[in-house]
Image: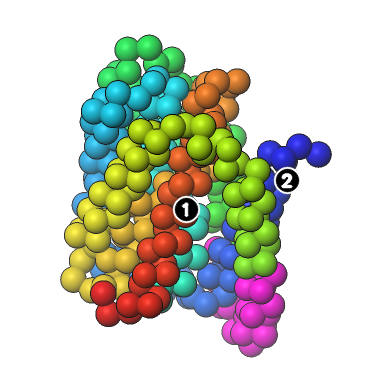
Amino acid sequence: MSAETIIRGLTIGSLSGLLFSVGLRLTVHQVIASLRGCRLGIIVAVNFLVIPALAVIATRLGHLGTDISLGILVLAAAPFAPVVPVFTRMARADLALAAGLTTLFPLLSVILTPLVLHLALQALPDARAIRFPTGEILLTLVATIAFPLGLGMAVKHFSSHVARSILRLVEIISEGTGALSLAFVSVTEWPLILSLGWPALLVMIALGEVSMIIGWLIGGPADATRRVVAFGTNNRNIALAILIAIQSFPGTPAVAAVVANGLLLILLGLLHVAWWRSNPGK
């Protein structure tokens, strides 16, 4: 069994379990109410227009190669990773809003991500055209994000007692799987991250931190909602980006750049979780 297969299995299992546990804590009414109260139009515009535009500028200013730039641009066009509700819960932010946005954004991505990428890739003279298998991507996003979240909320709706009784067990199993996945990925893919070179890593770190700040600023007046939008704007959907990269740029360093930069964003997200947990009022 290849390392990629192991990583994919551990990641899907962990995220599905974690999102299921998030759903066990929420009701549909809470999620809808949170979405109605957020600045949804601004959040969508920033994530699908501003962040990709900043990525184009960053890759040009950093004089990065075409393949590394492709990896960064594909990530920039795929907002709101499935880990956002997990980070949100760990950072004690608005879990209902995180669940709602994390469910909504993959559906928007099926329509908007290919359009954004077609525009962004015009800035790369040697870029290849993208292939976007809409049906496969939609099925993957629904199965790995919307379904476990919806299933968890359904269990809570029909039996809050069952939801409470299995919640901790589901969290322990999925968090353990997630820790194992992160450790395995870190060990096996660390040389890949370093192979990108410090200029590319610094560009991704700078872009990630700027995205985090922008998300915080547009998140609204409450710290709990600001943290959600900050995490979503910073953490791009690595699973969606990898699907696009494998379909469009198979066998090229662009796929490795997506993986390495996606992992780097997750590590940055974990650092922000640690900061907000130790400084809850900031």
Magenta span: predominant SS is: helix
Residue 138 is at least partly visible in this image: no
> Within the magenta stretch, is there residue 89?
no
Range drawn in magenta: 149-174
What kind of element bears circle 1?
Answer: helix
- The number of callouts visible is 2
Q: Is residue 4 left or right of residue 279?
A: right
Residue 251 is at least partly visible in this image: yes
Whichever of labels 1 and 2 marks the residue nearer the N terminus, that label is: 2
Give the camera-side residue of 263 and 223: 263
Q: Quadrant of the C terminus?
A: bottom left
For label 2, the residue is 6
What kind of element bears circle 2?
Answer: helix
Above or below: residue 217 compared with residue 167: above
x then y, percent, for residue 227: 32, 66
Picture disc at residue 266: 1
Give the class, few, some or many, for how many residues have Cα within 10 Å of label 1's Cα (few <14, many ≥20): many
